[in-house]
Every structure is written in C-alpha cells, then in structure tokens.
C-alpha cells in the first residue's frame, strides 16, 4: 500500500500519538542510563499529548541465528561473482561470513524463512494498535572496537559483541527481518 504523506501531520504535534511500549522488552535488562533516557523522553512526549500504550513484543529470542542464516545466504548469493574465486581479496570476517552462507542447508534456510514470515506477520499486527514503538537501539552503551577486531575473524568479533552488547540484536534484527521501518533518535547519554 502507498505510504501516507507525513507533511500534513508535521505541524500537528504529538497530541493523540500512540506510542507502544513493552516495558520488559525495552527497559528491563537494558543499560540503566539508556532506560532512564528513554523513560525521560517518553515523559516529555506524554506531556505534549502522546499516549503511552502498553504492548507486547513478539518473542525475538531466535532472531539472531535466523537473521545470520538469511543474511549470510543472501550475501553469498550477492557476492557469487567474486567469492570464492577472489576470496583472498576479502577480509577474514566477511570471508568467513560468506563461507558460512554457502554451507547453509536447504532445511535451515527454509526454517529461517518460516521464522521471518511469522515475525513479518506479528510485527505489523502489533503496529496496528499503536503509531510507533519506543525502545533502545542497542540496549548497551557503545563499545570500543579495534581495527584488528573489526577486520579479524568472525568468531572473535561475535564473542566481543556478545560480551559488550548481549541484547543489541533483539532491538535491530527483528525490524530488519520483518521489513518494519525503524528510526533511531538520540534521547540522552549513557
């Protein structure tokens, strides 16, 4: 369906805007500084007429492996003309990611596609009850990363990422998989 033009709503302010919040999903086990910043931003919006509406986010506990499966397969297909024939020209991380995409079984790919279809049905249904959802973009403060880690091996990068920001994929990958638009707005410091 065509998207409605936001021009008419730009001057309307926040009165009546329904902001969905799943408190457990968005604020529990999230960096306390980020949680406080989100809550403070929501109070400002509420004072300006927005309505904070409790919602329940679908279970996203399996989002990471399914996202990695689909992304690696799609990337391997997109790079088929140059990988593996020019594998030495890729960095270790991307080379390993492309290699993993080439080894995904048809069943694993089918399972990941089924998961995506289920999530794709659930998120838009949730968004019919509200205008927008509030939550963190990553759940933890930004973490330092070295050039060696960024261009190093896939397992080393994922180990560091999991240690520094264990829930970050829960806040970005669901929207990515389901094709739901997302925007990140700064609302404080942590």
Image (cartoon, rainbow, N blue to C red):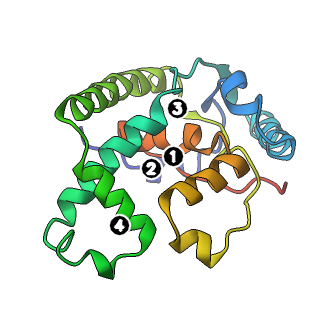
Image height check: is 138 above or below 51? below
Residue plotted at (56% across, 70% down): 150
Q: Residues within 10 Å of mark 4 (few under 14, many from 20)?
A: many
Between residue 141 and residue 47, name the one nearer to us: 141
Between residue 58 and residue 109, name the one nearer to us: 109
Between residue 60 and residue 163, name the one nearer to us: 163
Q: Quadrant of the C terminus?
A: bottom right
Residue under pointer 4: 95
Indicate the secondary structure of the residue bearing disc 1.
helix
Q: Residue furthest left?
A: 81
Labels 1 and 4: the sequence-earlier one: 1
Mark nearest the camera among 3 and 4 is: 4
Residue 6 numbered mark, or none: 2
Image position, residue 50 (x, y; %): 69, 32
Q: Are marks 1 and 4 in contact (CB under 8 Å)?
A: no
Image position, residue 98 (x, y; %): 30, 59
Q: Residues within 10 Å of mark 2 (few under 14, many from 20)?
A: few
Q: Are marks 1 and 2 in contact (CB under 8 Å)?
A: yes
Residue under pointer 1: 9
In three-dimensional space, the C-alpha distance between marks 1 and 4, rounded to whole angstroms, equals 46 Å
Residue under pointer 3: 131
Q: Are marks 2 and 3 in contact (CB under 8 Å)?
A: no
Mark nearest the camera among 4 and 2 is: 4
Indicate the secondary structure of the residue bearing disc 4.
helix
Indicate the secondary structure of the residue bearing disc 3.
loop
Image position, residue 110 (x, y; %): 21, 29
- How many numbered marks, from 0 up? 4
Q: Residues within 10 Å of mark 1 (few under 14, many from 20)?
A: few
Along the horizontal axis of the image, is 35 left or right of 120?
right
């Amino acid at each position: 369906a065509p998207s409605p033009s936001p021009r008419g709503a730009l001057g309307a302010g926040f009165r009546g805007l329904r902001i969905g919040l799943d408190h457990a999903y968005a604020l529990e086990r999230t960096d306390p500084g980020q949680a406080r910043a989100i809550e403070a931003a929501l109070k400002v919006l509420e004072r300006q007429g927005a309505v904070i509406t409790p919602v329940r986010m679908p279970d996203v506990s399996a989002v990471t492996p399914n996202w990695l499966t689909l992304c690696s397969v799609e990337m391997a297909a997109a790079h088929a003309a140059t990988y593996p024939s020019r594998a030495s020209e890729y960095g270790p991380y991307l080379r390993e990611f492309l290699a993993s995409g080439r080894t995904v079984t048809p069943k694993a790919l089918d399972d990941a596609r089924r998961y995506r279809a289920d999530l794709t049905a659930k998120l838009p249904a949730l968004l019919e009850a509200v205008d927008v959802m509030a939550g963190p973009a990553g759940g933890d403060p930004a973490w330092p990363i070295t050039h060696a880690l960024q261009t190093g091996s896939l397992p080393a990068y994922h180990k560091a990422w999991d240690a520094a920001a264990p829930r970050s994929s829960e806040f970005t990958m669901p929207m990515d998989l389901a094709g739901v638009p997302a925007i990140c707005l700064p609302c404080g410091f942590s």
